[in-house]
Amino acid sequence: MTFRRAGGEADEERNDGGVPAPPSVSLPVPDGGKRVIRRLIAHFSLRLIVAGILLVVLAVLILYWMQLKLLDLDAGRSFAQAGMLKLIDTMEVDEAGTPHFDEELLDLVRSEGGWVQMLDGQGRVTYSVFTPEDVPTAYKPGEFVAYWKKQEPFPYDLAVWIRQRGSVTYTLLYGVIPEEKRLLQMVMDTAGAPGPRLTLPPGLEDQLKEAEATVQLLDPSGRQVASFGSAGKVLTEYSLQELALRSVYGNRYGLKLASHYDSRTQYTWVVTTPFHEKGVLGGVLKNEISVMLVAFAGLLLTTLLLFLLLSLWYANRFGGPVLHMIDWLQQLGQGRFREPHGLRGPRSLDRKGRLQRRYRLFADVFLSLRRLTGILSRNEEMRDKLEQTREEWITGVSHDLKTPLTSIKGYSHMLEAPDYGWSTDEIREFAGEIREMSEYMELLIDDLSLTYRLQNEALPLELRETELNDLTDIVIRRFRTNPRFAGARIVFRPAPGPLVTRVDERWLSRAIVNLLANAVLHNPEGTVVEVGVAEDGEAGSFARLEIRDNGSGMDEETVGRLFERYYRGTNTEGGSDGTGLGMAIARQIVLAHHGNIRVESELGRGTVVTIWLRQASVPVEAV
């Protein structure tokens, strides 16, 4: 069947009051906002934890580096203390039992003028490097201890390290004559008895100059009485404390000091040499403070670099998608309903149409934006169609109003003409035509007013418990008494039991009449219209009213837009077929009752209109 009508606005089909909707199913939409927040919290927390772990690792590495450099400083100042410990730590023993040491440390041993021996459990030397000829190749236990504690004359200062690695015990012996002590001994051997004047042989003077050494002769009170060499940081008068501190902690003053007290004359020989950076020492790492400053600066710079890289990564990872979403929203605000495109299409999608990695954190937001874009795009299309159909509808309404107005105006001119006298029968005929045209115009205006009142929910309903079988039967009987529908073939199939609903009988009857009128008027003669009432829904909680015909049917587009306002102009052939607003009014009346309505149709196979209404909680007996 073909419906000609102008109806309500293109609203989504409602499902109020639990009324079963047509076959489409609405799934609950997950709370994407909370999921995005949880994802962001987890993401930021994980990255901050990783950054914290990296900072801890960097701090540990820098502290380890600082410890190594401090050991290097100590090794450069006194290899017997820090250097030997590092030498043992870096020692590697091959399968033959031969030890191998770090070459830089061995170079430092050579530059210090020292030597290294390794002893077994019996005191025999199993390995030696840079060892002079006057150094023994085996030691008796008592002899070794006497040399070590200076209980027996031995020209070298000894440092002993005993370390067990695995099941083997290693004894490492380091011997050296410090340069300042060697020079002091040469001065004492060649300078003669102490006196107010210091006389040194030319060869010794050259050695002292090469070593940048300073020779001083102090009187019993610690005052310098004679000297040779650069003054530099050397004092000219020593207190007891000054001489003691400089002899033991020379590295604090950047000097190495050796002294000898002559008990016979009470004079003191002092030889001072500067510290020289050797081997692993160099550049700015001259003391503990410089090492700590470099370590602190390194930690600060690496921390800043890490946070800079992290900031750039976050800016690219989060700033890019956020800016893209802002561009998208601005584009929607400008009426361009699509995602901003790049060279390869939508920026957030890869070539396979999947969300790119850096956009996946905001997957729910992008899904919502795509839905919003689609809805806005469809609404824009619907608005354009609405405007077009509105204009068509206004044209049709204008025509519908103009046609009876033209007839009324024509009959009025005829009655008004002085040149012709009309008979009583003719006047009655003209008056009848004018009355019919006026009634049609009044009906059209009333229907227009009714559609807008229904749309704006301004139509008060007087809901009463009503038995639907009886109401439908009464409506059909009255419908048949109308001369226009005298030849209609309508079959009524009531429900086997009473179906009580809360409805406004006047307006629901109007909706059923409109549907019956459309089924009869817009189908070929002889079309059979079946009206059925039955229970529907779980436990029969709904009453279903079905109007089925075997007429011409409708195409898919007409079915889809059947309830749109302004879909098609009203009847332009005259007033006898109604106003053309019947389907719009029927749908709006059903929705006002918190019901639902659905139309199914195919060309050549007829049409089925189904109405659902909730049953009243307390049924009444059918009359």
Image: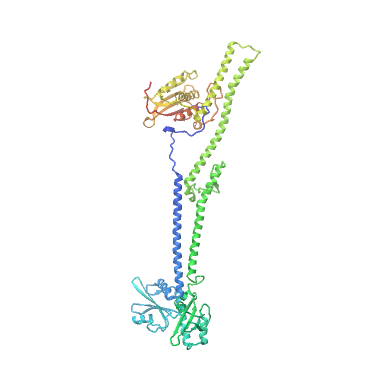
From this view, report whether residue 533 is shown above or below residue 205.
above
Which percent across, then down, holds residue 128?
40, 78
Which percent across, then down, holds residue 213?
50, 81
Work out whether residue 26 can be spotted. Answer: yes
The front one of 44 and 364 is 44
* Count of number-bearing discs: 0
Q: Residue furthest bottom?
A: 192
Work out whether residue 583 can be spotted. Answer: no
Q: Residue 125's quadrant in the figure?
A: bottom left
Looking at the rendered image, the quarter that the C terminus falls into is top left
From this view, report whether residue 363 is shown above or below residue 398.
below
From this view, report whether residue 56 is shown above or below residue 447.
below
Which percent across, then down, holds residue 532?
41, 25
Q: Residue furthest right?
A: 419
The front one of 490 and 456 is 456
The residue at 52%/41% (across/down) is: 373
Which percent across, then down, holds residue 422?
61, 12
> Colour mode?
rainbow
The residue at 49%/61% (across/down) is: 302
